[in-house]
Image (cartoon, rainbow, N blue to C red):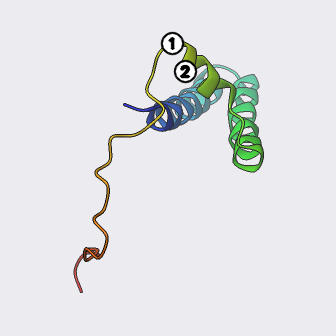
Amino acid sequence: MCTERWIRLFAGSMILISLALAHWVSGWWYGVTIFVGLNLLQSSLTRFCPLEKVLQCAGVSSACDRPAARPGAAVSRGKE
């Protein structure tokens, strides 16, 4: 998996885990949810993500393995 997918997996997991902990343990866990949400917001505006830097240091590939589209190839948009 590439860094983009790891970041989405980590952020989504942290949000769900912190919401569950806030519901069953303590409302203070909402702070983690807010932190992750604010970090996602700032990374969308500044294009800087601390987790991306950590993943790059860990050797995770930064490019997703997506096949390149051929020039002039038809793009499938699902059922039409």
Seen in the picture, residue 55 relative to 69 is either above or below; the reply is above
What x and y, as percent, mark residue 10? 52, 28
Q: Is residue 61 left or right of residue 53?
A: left
Q: Residue at x 76, y 28 (%)?
A: 31
- Going by the picture, which residue comes out furthest to the left? 79
Quarter of the picture holding the C terminus:
bottom left
Front-most of residues 38 and 65: 65
Residue matched to label 2: 56
Seen in the picture, residue 35 relative to 60 is either above or below; the reply is below
Q: Residue at x 63, y 19 (%)?
A: 25
What x and y, as percent, mark residue 54? 60, 17
Front-most of residues 15 and 10: 10
Quarter of the picture holding the N terminus:
top left
Q: Residue at x 63, y 22 (%)?
A: 53
Query: SS of the residue at dot 1?
Result: loop
Q: Is residue 71 left or right of residue 21?
A: left
Q: Is residue 18 left or right of residue 43?
A: left
Given the image, on which type of amino acid does mark 1 rest?
A: Ala
Query: SS of the residue at dot 2?
Result: helix
Q: Is residue 80 left or right of residue 4?
A: left
Q: Which mark is residue 58?
A: 1
- Going by the picture, which residue comes out furthest to the bottom? 80
Q: Quadrant of residue 76?
A: bottom left
Q: Are marks 1 and 2 in contact (CB under 8 Å)?
A: yes
What x and y, as percent, mark residue 3? 49, 31
Query: Badge 1 local density, few (<14 within 10 Å), some, or many (20+)?
Result: few
Q: Quadrant of residue 34?
A: top right
What x and y, as percent, mark residue 48? 72, 36
